Image (spheres, rainbow, N blue to C red):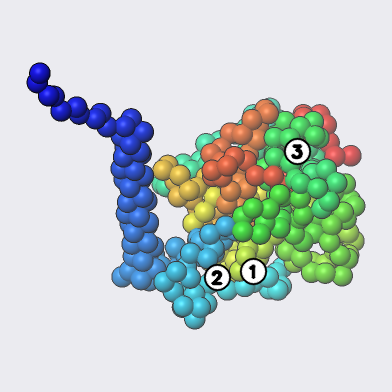
Amino acid sequence: MRNETSRKKPAAGGAVGRVFGRFGFFVLWTLILALIVLLGVVWVMEKGPSPTMTAVFCRSMRETSAIRWIPNIFLSDEEIDALKSESTEDFQTEAVNTSLIHVAAGDPEADADEAAEPELQVIDISMGTVKGKLMIVRDPSRIILGTSNNLGRQAGLQLTDLVAKYGGVAGINAGGFNDENGTGNGGIPQGLVITYGEMVWGGVNTNYNLIGFDRNNILHVGRMTGMEALNRGIQHAVSFVTHDGVASALIINGEIQSQNLVSGVNPRTAIGQREDGAVLLLVLDGRSINTVGATMENICDIMLQYGAVNAGNLDGGSSSVMVYDGRIINHCASVTGPRYIPTGFVVLPEGETDA
């Protein structure tokens, strides 16, 4: 009788384990290589041959909440300080000259102009690498400042919900908010908040970089205390400065505020007003394959092109969103979806005003 040597089949579990082991090894090395490439890119941006590119890169990173630490990877604190946007938060600006704005109300010539231009229109902005949306609202009395529920005491609202809360047809994000490490819930505003003539956040004796409308629907941008804002009849307003303290006023009485233009490249939100009172709501996209973003100078160029007499910079980055007809119409830069925010400028339906 012939003896046959039995052969053991390899255990199925062992084969599966080897497959997963090889897959895990591949994923690990892929991540390591990706990290090396990413660090290489950061090194080139921070230590490369172009000082201008280094400055723009570092300023862009510092304007964010979650990744503003990236410049510290290869640069010392002294090198970063030399590249930071110089604070202009306490810079005293000229007051808005309200006589330069003529809100079209009951003027026959203005009524004729209204027939030639829609009450609300959305324009696609494409200027080189800068892309976004500009909304023109002819009647400034339709613009109010909306706030999230129980301001400062619970999470904020996404802009679509905030606009819906007030029965609005459109809106943009407005003031800044506490956002530690980019993971805040958007419930606590920074600075001043005034809505329907009532100061709901901030202090009467504190100075703010204000952006908002008075009772005559004229946009104000510039530095003032909470009490000065109330004395000027401000009805709907927020305040905003960048992380490095660059103030929000970009155009005052037709003049560019050059001290506030030093910036990086990021998504942007801004608001302006033409001589005839029409409001310009601007949201510029960024952090995408289509566009990396815009500078403060880009905002000024667009605002002046469309006739702004006064204009101010609002919160940007992942918060930059424009809503129209119940949906977001720009490219939201946040990878986790629209941010939760405490404030937004809301456009009421035609025929409705903040009165």
Where 344 falls versus 257 (above or below)? above
Locate residue 199, reporting x and y percent.
Answer: 88, 55
Q: Is residue 297 left or right of residue 33?
A: right
Residue located farthest toward the top when viewing the structure as drawn: 1
Mark before the other along the chain sequence, 3 or 2 = 2
Look at 88% across and 65% down and name the residue there. 204
Locate residue 300, reporting x and y percent.
Answer: 56, 55
SS for tag 2? Answer: loop
- Give whichever of 202, 117 is nearer the camera: 202
- Give whichever of 257, 110 is nearer the camera: 257
Kindly report the distance in space between the C-alpha atoms of the residues bearing marks 3 and 2: 32 Å
Asked if one can make out residue 252 in the rendered structure from this viewpoint, the answer is no
Look at 78% across and 37% down and name the residue there. 142
Q: Residues within 10 Å of mark 1 (few under 14, many from 20)?
A: some
Mark before the other along the chain sequence, 1 or 2 = 2
Identify which amino acid the numbered label 2 is placed on.
Ser
**In the picture, which quadrant includes the N terminus?**
top left
**Residue at image mark 3:** 162
**In the picture, which quadrant includes the C terminus?**
top right
The answer to whether the residue labelled 1 contacts the one labelled 2, judged by CB atoms less than 8 Å apart, is yes
Mark before the other along the chain sequence, 3 or 1 = 3
**Residue at image mark 2:** 85
Locate residue 149, reporting x and y percent.
Answer: 83, 43
Q: Is residue 263 left or right of residue 173?
A: left
Tally of marks = 3
- Give whichever of 6, 201 is nearer the camera: 6
**Residue at image mark 1:** 245
Locate residue 25, reporting x and y percent.
Answer: 33, 47
Identify which amino acid the numbered label 3 is placed on.
Leu
